[in-house]
Amino acid sequence: MAKFNSRVSKFLIDNTSGTVCDLSAYLTEISGIPGERETSDSTTIGDSGRERFPGLENGMIRIAGFFDDTTTTGPDAVLAALLTHTAAVDCNYGPKGSTTGFRRFDMDVWVRRYEVTSRVGEMVGFIAELEVEGQVTADTQAFIT
């Protein structure tokens, strides 16, 4: 079984101008990709157990990391602006890095939640939730930066 360290993971998201921003250096956590799928109960009278029918994908991504308010490139500038943006933006995640041939997840997302966090004895950080618009797709193409 191949193993690799998350230090090579890559996370890109477009800003409100459509420019690709690499937030990888700020992140300490990425979770929720590729996401979940809803199911509907299709059990009828006479069935001996629950039956399910597959439904829609319902992706919610959580990212967390270190706060940085560098103009245009820091996570605060990118994510705070996307919180009020009126369109979903492109987002790419490569758990194994950005090399062609490695698995990459592509999706359009809405920033649903963005919070700056402070706690005694810890670095100032942030938490964001990104809601997926449509489906998460997986491929092995190189990242476009």
Image (spheres, rainbow, N blue to C red):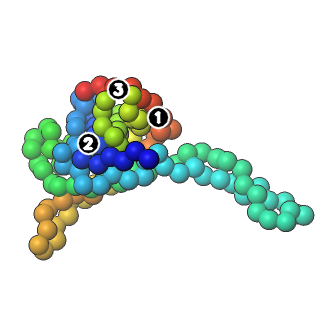
Question: Residue 140, how many percent across, how many down?
Answer: 42, 29
Q: Which residue is mark 2?
A: 8
The C terminus lies in quadrant = top left
Name the foreground residue: 78 vs 99: 99
Question: Residue 24, how many percent across, how many down?
Answer: 23, 43
Mark in the foreground, 1 or 3: 3
**Kind of residue sitting beneath label 3:** Thr
* C-alpha distance separating marks 2 and 1: 18 Å
Q: Which residue is mark 1?
A: 138
Q: Is residue 141 left or right of residue 65?
A: right
Q: Is residue 141 left or right of residue 72?
A: right
Marks 2 and 1 in Cβ contact (< 8 Å): no
**Kind of residue sitting beneath label 1:** Ala
Q: Is residue 83 something one can see in this rendering?
A: no
Q: Is residue 90 something one can see in this rendering?
A: yes
Residue at 72% in and 55% down: 52
**Kind of residue sitting beneath label 2:** Val
Name the foreground residue: 32 vs 134: 32
